[in-house]
Image (spheres, rainbow, N blue to C red):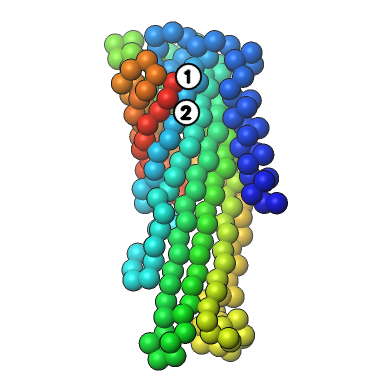
Amino acid sequence: MKTNKKISILGTVVLLGLSPAAFGQSSGDEAFGKGSNVIGIGVGLGGEYTYFGDGYTSTPNIVLSYDNGTFGNVGPGTISLGGLLSYKGISYDYTDFHSGYSYDQAWTYYVIGIRSAYHLSIPSAPRFDPYAGIMLAYYDIGYKESSTDPYYDVPGSPYYSYYANTYGSYLAFSLYIGARYNLSDHIGIWLELGYGYSNAALGVSFKL
């Protein structure tokens, strides 16, 4: 049920942004202008939820973003509206040397956000798209555990405190800055700093 809700929220954001009738046509030769539609796919680096040490494994922080050039000719640039989806998974496996029991923990981190940015137009650099923005996101944190210890979830067990934790989901604002460079009319590369569970994210962009 929770997964279906996440997909529905993201789908609504993407469908609203992809509607040419709602936001107009592309602006031509600008790196990013009114009517531009850009999808970004990338990976995040660092962030608050980063674990190191024996027993920890982690997936890359996978990022999918969408930006639409919604309001053009705002000073020397364009204001975009769009959305972002990010996922990261972490697991921790431990086997007690004395008892032989194994203890496993797993966390999933989803970020589903609606965001807006100001894209500065630079006529002398028509392939370069620097921007800064703000995002309101729902941070969904999932957690589960398992163990071969029959008493692991019983208060008083040596490892009970590890498994008695709960992780709440929440809404939060964040700021980010970024830049996109168009290698061709439809493909580019991008870098963003300062949002979600990443300190930095980079990847490939596709201009529709």
The vertical placement of 132 against 158, above or below, is above
Element at badge 2?
A: strand
The vertical placement of 159 against 54, above or below, is below
Residue 4, horizontal then vertical, whole percent = 67, 46
Name, please, the residue furthest toward the top: 28
Report the Cα–Cα distance between label 1 and label 2. Answer: 8 Å
Tag shown at residue 208: 1
Name, please, the residue furthest toward the bottom: 98
Residue 208, horizontal then vertical, whole percent = 47, 19
Tag shown at residue 39: 2
Residue drawn 38% across the image and 70% down it: 55
Q: Is residue 155 left or right of residue 200?
A: right
Quadrant in the rendering for residue 81: top right
> Disc 2 residue type?
Ile
Quadrant in the rendering for residue 189: top left
Q: Is residue 130 left or right of residue 113?
A: left
